[in-house]
Every structure is written in structure tokens, then in C-alpha cells.
């Protein structure tokens, strides 16, 4: 079994599907011989040919539109948006077509496609390279939105995304692309796209997060353990559709919940989770639900990005607030 | 200074507005009277249908409807030139092309009657549904064409935009994609002179819209879009190139929107009546009838027979549309995903319980 980073796991999943399904193709900017700016498609064009790992002209709307066209005609395209900040020209095709084609044609045409995009801050990137806008997509009916937080989940979830009969937006937290290595068996085993993962069991407080914030969340849980506070950690992983059952179950046990996200607070995925807890889980709660999020500001250029992004201290601050209530 | 590139745009016309064959070379289709008569019949059926659809909207029996009045030659020309295996990516008024390909009249009514089942239409099941966001169908067609090319299939994709749509990024990006990937594709511009209230000249100062294809190095021509023979011949030739692996073409068909943009529009607010009256002398059905009559292929008796058959067919379609089974609230949920997610299943059950209560 190989020890791989998250970005290597992404590559591994795509290679596995290119190998086993002739209808799978990859398309995007610089994904060919160059292997992608984050090396997510490294070696794939060389191994599978430039007809299957396709460098496109520099036109994101075209990439998304062609991805819809390919998917409706029997292919399983994986498109790469080079950065989430460049996904906006694709938005129309995602929201007006990929998400609606099955419904519009009563299932006559479908869009089994994946659009991958590296996202999030913390790598000292230029403007438009650091935002977390997953909520914009989670608000759209008809698509699935998936965010891995570890190499093994990147592998298993991406396999499932590629095989999904419905369109999947797959957002990769690039800050943790190379953070740590994990043993991932290249066995083609997919992970389900309709559930959260309990990463660590605990009894006192539930920490709900996804993507890169898993790193700070785990560190915060370790610090809490040292204080004698037992935190349960949930990786949401698929933010749409959202598996609230797992979260409710955990909160029923702990009575406290802190949601941690890198994205801005207003109308975000944490808002949805908190609203669901208020609606269906209020009587399980000992303390108010708290959120640790980015601010409702423009994501700053990198000199300030560390002050924007939630830190272990900010997580501990909110957890201590809910622990004070008994 | 030297010239590194130059271009010219040809204009193709075989049938003059008077119904005379013009030009030196005449394509075989110009004397294939059995074919032309069947096309004429479909043109008249399409127009009869169109008038009925507008009437249905005016009497509250149909939602907003986009008329195809005056576009019969170009639309049916596209449909007739295409093979069944090709993929059609229309905008939202190319009924003539779609009728030729097997879409039912009643299905068009179903769609404009506010029922998604209209887009689950008959005919080639790989054809794209109507596409309301302007020009986005062009990049879908490019994707379809890439699928055919990657699989080595002898098929092509045909997209349609209007003169307004030719200003949009997706159209231009599709031209570029067709060029970069040498796609088996035909990009049609149905230039009917009006994008709702904005006239052709405000879309671009370019002498033609066809020349936008020149930027991608694609063979690009103008045709008389009211001349079925010209449209059919041009699209056939472009498709032949596509099947032979020679890449995509752009065809600008010059026609005129004799109707309002849709039934929600009133063109008299922005368009002079005399312009419309003038355009009627170039309209496609009259000239085809003149041509067939002059060739001894058509007469008043046949015309009357045709008109009554069309009325029967259209009435039958209206009946079919009006007798469509009732939609239930479940229809809103059932095609969102292959498998309904858990939370959506709960919403569906709730909506169904409300529906049952209101029915009960």
C-alpha cells in the first residue's frame, strides 16, 4: 500500500477511472503534458494519451459547456477549474444546464460529470486564488458538492464522484494538498456521497467541519483533550446533499456543537447546519450552536489571510464558550 | 507591410424571392421534386402549427410562446440536411428542424404549456432540449462533437444561435473550440435581424456575422435563409466536411422574424410596420410554392388539400396536448437525481401529503 498526499490521491483516483472506464476523459487548462498547476494530473496525459487528458483553449465557459455536451453524449468528463476563483465563467453551465438537464428532459439526457477545483486560502496566492465559495454551489439543486479532507477520502470520494450518474462539484482544499501522507490502497473502493464521516469519537462537544479546516479542528480537539474535554469530530465531506442524521446523532450525544469553516459566515454551509440543528435538534442542545468562520469580508490578499482564516485559538474560544453552559 | 491573412464571405442563393432558380450550378435537390414537395408540406404544417400556438396563447391555453414565423426554410433546411445520428442543439424556436427529426407537434405545445415532459421529446433521443440561456447550446454542441471525434464516430453536432446570440461568449468560444479541436460541427447563425428589440446592426459593426467564424479559421458563408435549397445545400456540404474529419463550419442564414419575439413581446413598439411588410416579399413559403407551381409540381387543389390536412394534424396535436395526463407534485422531485437524496425525499413526502389533502 502506498503512502500518498491528498493531491496524489486525487491523481490516483483519476488514473484508476481512466484505466477502467473508456468513457472517462479529463479536460482543462494545463492538465495535459504539464500535469496541472498543482500536478493533480501529473503523468496522466503521458500514460493515457492526449485524447483522454485534454489540454483545452483558455476558456472556462467553453470547458464547462463542452463538459455538459460530453456528458450528455455518453462520456464521463472530469473538468478541472484551475482555481475556484476562475469557476465563475462555468457557473452558467453548472447552474443552468448540468444541474437541470436530467430534470429538464425527464432523464432522457443526464450529466454524469465532475468539475474539480482547488480552493481555499493559506498558500500565499494572488488575488482570486484563495476564496471558499462552496455555499454558492450547495444552494443549487441538482448537483452534488463534495470536499475531501484527507488523502483516503479524496481517493474514495473522487472515485464516487466520477462514477456518479449526477453532476458533482469536487472542491479540493489545496492548503492541505501536501500536508500529510496517508496509506491509500488503489483498490477502486469508493466512499459514499451521502454521508458525513465521524473522524474522532467524543462525548462533550461535536466539532463539525470539512476541507482544510480539518487540520485546525483536529489540533483544537487535541488541545481540548489535554484540558479533559472530549470532542467528537465530524467531516461533512459531502456538503450537498447534506447528511444531517450523522450530525444530529452526534449532537444528541454531546449536547454541544461548534461548526468550523473557512468560508464567510453569511448564508453559508454552517448556516444550513445550524438552522437544521435549531429545527430538528434543539432539545438535544445544552448550549447554543457556535460557528467559527471566515469574516464577511473580501478574502484579503495574503498578508492578512492568516487573520481571516479560523485558527485553533478561535476554535478553542468558541468551544470554551459552549462548555461554560451546563 | 505584407498581408498574412485575408478573407471573403460568399453568399449562397438558388431560389430567388420570385421563385426562380438562379445561378449557374444547380444542386440535385433543386429538381428533386418529391423531396421539395414533402419539404413544402412540412413548411406549411409548421406555419399552421405556429399560428395555432399563438392563438392558444392569446386565449390562455398556452404559456409564452416563441413563434417561428418566417424561419421555416432555414429551420427545415437544417433538419433535412442532418442525419438521425447527428446531434441537434437548438435554441428555442427551431420547430421545423425538430418536426423533421421526429419531434411531435404536441410536445412543443407541452413545453410552452409549462410541462417539462415536452423536452422528453420524440425523435433522436440524443438531441438537446430547447435552450433558453442564449448561445450556451453552442458549447454543448462542441462537447457532443468532441465525444463523436474521440469515439471515432461519423457524426456531427449542429448548433443554432440568432444574430443576438452571435455576440455571446459561448458562441465565440464554441467557434474557437471547433477550430482548436477540429470538431465535426456546424455552427448555424439564424440571423432574423432582431434580438427582441435590438436590430442586427447594433450587435456588431461587422459586415457579416458569418465572418466571426473566420477568426477560428472555419469555412464561413452566408446563405439566403428563406431559400430552402440554399440552406439544405450549405448545411449538407458543411456536414460532409464534418464527417470527413475536416472540421467545423459556420453558416449565417439571412432571414426575417415576421412575428414578435415571443407572445410576451409587442414588436410594433420598436419595429416599423413597413419593414415587416417589405420582408414578407422575401418569405420562404411563398417562393417555394411559386417555384413548385412554375415547375408544374403544385396547384391550387393540392394547396387546398394540404391546408386541410395541416389543420387536421394541428387540431389533433392540440387535442393530444390538452389531454396530457395531469402533473403531480412528485414530478418536481423525481428527476432531480438518479436517486433522490434523503432530505429531498422528506420534502417530497411532505409536498405529497399537502397535495393529497388538497385533493381530498
Image (cartoon, coloured by chain):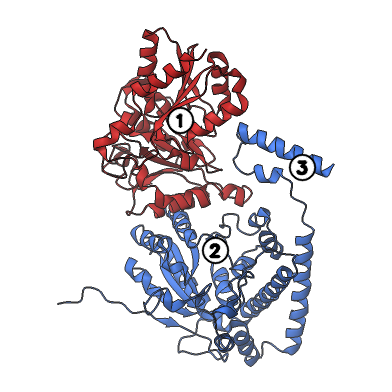
Chain colours: A red, B blue
Asked whether B284 or B168 is in front, the reply is B168
Q: Residue at x 71, y 42 (%)?
A: B330
From the image, state whether disc 3 or disc 2 is nearer to you.
Answer: 3
- Residue farthest toward the right in the current orientation of the protein: B360
Q: Position of residue B224 (x, y in %)?
A: 49, 81
Q: Which residue is mark 3?
A: B355
Q: Which residue is mark 1?
A: A157
Label 2 chain ID: B
Cα distance between the residues tagged 3 and 2? 35 Å
Q: Are marks 3 and 1 in contact (CB under 8 Å)?
A: no
The image shows residue A30, relative to residue B169, as above or below, that is above
Cα distance between the residues tagged 3 and 1? 37 Å
Q: Which residue is mark 2?
A: B90
**Residue B298's disc number:** none
Q: Position of residue B64 (x, y in %)?
A: 65, 65
Q: Secondary structure at mark 2?
A: loop
Amino acid at each position: 500500500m502506498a503512502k500518498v498526499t491528498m493531491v496524489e490521491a486525487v491523481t490516483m483516483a483519476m488514473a484508476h477511472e481512466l484505466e477502467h472506464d473508456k468513457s472517462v476523459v479529463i479536460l482543462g487548462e494545463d492538465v495535459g503534458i504539464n500535469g496541472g498547476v498543482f500536478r493533480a494530473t501529473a503523468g496522466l496525459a503521458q500514460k493515457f494519451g492526449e485524447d483522454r487528458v485534454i489540454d483545452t483553449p483558455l476558456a472556462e465557459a467553453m470547458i464547462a459547456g463542452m463538459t455538459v455536451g460530453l456528458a450528455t453524449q455518453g462520456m464521463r468528463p472530469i473538468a478541472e477549474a484551475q482555481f475556484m476563483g476562475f469557476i465563475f465563467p462555468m457557473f452558467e453551465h453548472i447552474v443552468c444546464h448540468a444541474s437541470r438537464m436530467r430534470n429538464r428532459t425527464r432523464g432522457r439526457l443526464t450529466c454524469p460529470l465532475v468539475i474539480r477545483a482547488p480552493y481555499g486560502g493559506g498558500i500565499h496566492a494572488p488575488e482570486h486564488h484563495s476564496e471558499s465559495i462552496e455555499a454558492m454551489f450547495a444552494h443549487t439543486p441538482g448537483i452534488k458538492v463534495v470536499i475531501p479532507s484527507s488523502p483516503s477520502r479524496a481517493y474514495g470520494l473522487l472515485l464516487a464522484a466520477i462514477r456518479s450518474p449526477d453532476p458533482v462539484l469536487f472542491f479540493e482544499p489545496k492548503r492541505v494538498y501536501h500536508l500529510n501522507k496517508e496509506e491509500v490502497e488503489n483498490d477502486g473502493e469508493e466512499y459514499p456521497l451521502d454521508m458525513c464521516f465521524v473522524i474522532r469519537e467524543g462525548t462533550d462537544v461535536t466539532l463539525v467541519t470539512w476541507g482544510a479546516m480539518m487540520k485546525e479542528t483536529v489540533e483544537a480537539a487535541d488541545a481540548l483533550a489535554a484540558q479533559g474535554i472530549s470532542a467528537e469530530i465530524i467531516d461533512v465531506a459531502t456538503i450537498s446533499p447534506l447528511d444531517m442524521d450523522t450530525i444530529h446523532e452526534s449532537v444528541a450525544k454531546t449536547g454541544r456543537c461548534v461548526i468550523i469553516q473557512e468560508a464567510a459566515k453569511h448564508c453559508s454551509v454552517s448556516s444550513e447546519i445550524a438552522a437544521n440543528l435549531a429545527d430538528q435538534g434543539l432539545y438535544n442542545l445544552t448550549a447554543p450552536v457556535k460557528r467559527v468562520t471566515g469574516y464577511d469580508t473580501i478574502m484579503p490578499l495574503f498578508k492578512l489571510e492568516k487573520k481571516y482564516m479560523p485558527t485553533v485559538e478561535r476554535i478553542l474560544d468558541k468551544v470554551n464558550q459552549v462548555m461554560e453552559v451546563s | 507591410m505584407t498581408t498574412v491573412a485575408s478573407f471573403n464571405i460568399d453568399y449562397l442563393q438558388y431560389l430567388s424571392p420570385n421563385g426562380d432558380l438562379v445561378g449557374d450550378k444547380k444542386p440535385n435537390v433543386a429538381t428533386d421534386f418529391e423531396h421539395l414537395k414533402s419539404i413544402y408540406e412540412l413548411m406549411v404544417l409548421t406555419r399552421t402549427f405556429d399560428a395555432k400556438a399563438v392563438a392558444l396563447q392569446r386565449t390562455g391555453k398556452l404559456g409564452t410562446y416563441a413563434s417561428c414565423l418566417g424561419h421555416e426554410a432555414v429551420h427545415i433546411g437544417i433538419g433535412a440536411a442532418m442525419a438521425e445520428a447527428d446531434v441537434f442543439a437548438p435554441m428555442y424556436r427551431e420547430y421545423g428542424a425538430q418536426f423533421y427529426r421526429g419531434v411531435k407537434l404536441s410536445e412543443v405545445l407541452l413545453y410552452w404549456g409549462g410541462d417539462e415532459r415536452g423536452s422528453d421529446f420524440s425523435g433522436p433521443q440524443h438531441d438537446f432540449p430547447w435552450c433558453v440561456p442564449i448561445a450556451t447550446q453552442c458549447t454543448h454542441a462542441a462537447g457532443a462533437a468532441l465525444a463523436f471525434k474521440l469515439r471515432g464516430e461519423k457524426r456531427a453536432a449542429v448548433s443554432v444561435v440568432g444574430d443576438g446570440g452571435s455576440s455571446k461568449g459561448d458562441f465565440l468560444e464554441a467557434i474557437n473550440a471547433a477550430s482548436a479541436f477540429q470538431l465535426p460541427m456546424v455552427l448555424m447563425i439564424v440571423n432574423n435581424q432582431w434580438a427582441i428589440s435590438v436590430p442586427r446592426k447594433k450587435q456588431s459593426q461587422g459586415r457579416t456575422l458569418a465572418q466571426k467564424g473566420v477568426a477560428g479559421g472555419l469555412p464561413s458563408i452566408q446563405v439566403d435563409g428563406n431559400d430552402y435549397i440554399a440552406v439544405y445545400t450549405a448545411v449538407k456540404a458543411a456536414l460532409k466536411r464534418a464527417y470527413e474529419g475536416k472540421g467545423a463550419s459556420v453558416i449565417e442564414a439571412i432571414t426575417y422574424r415576421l412575428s414578435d419575439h415571443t407572445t410576451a413581446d409587442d414588436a410594433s413598439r420598436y419595429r416599423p410596420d413597413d419593414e415587416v411588410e417589405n420582408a414578407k416579399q422575401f418569405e420562404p413559403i411563398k417562393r417555394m410554392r411559386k417555384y413548385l407551381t412554375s415547375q408544374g409540381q403544385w396547384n391550387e387543389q393540392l394547396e387546398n388539400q394540404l391546408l386541410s390536412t395541416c389543420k387536421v394534424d394541428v387540431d389533433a396535436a392540440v387535442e393530444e396536448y390538452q389531454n396530457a395526463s395531469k402533473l403531480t407534485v412528485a414530478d418536481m422531485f423525481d428527476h432531480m437525481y438518479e436517486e433522490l437524496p434523503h432530505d429531498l425525499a422528506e420534502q417530497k413526502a411532505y409536498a405529497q401529503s399537502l397535495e393529497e389533502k388538497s385533493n381530498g
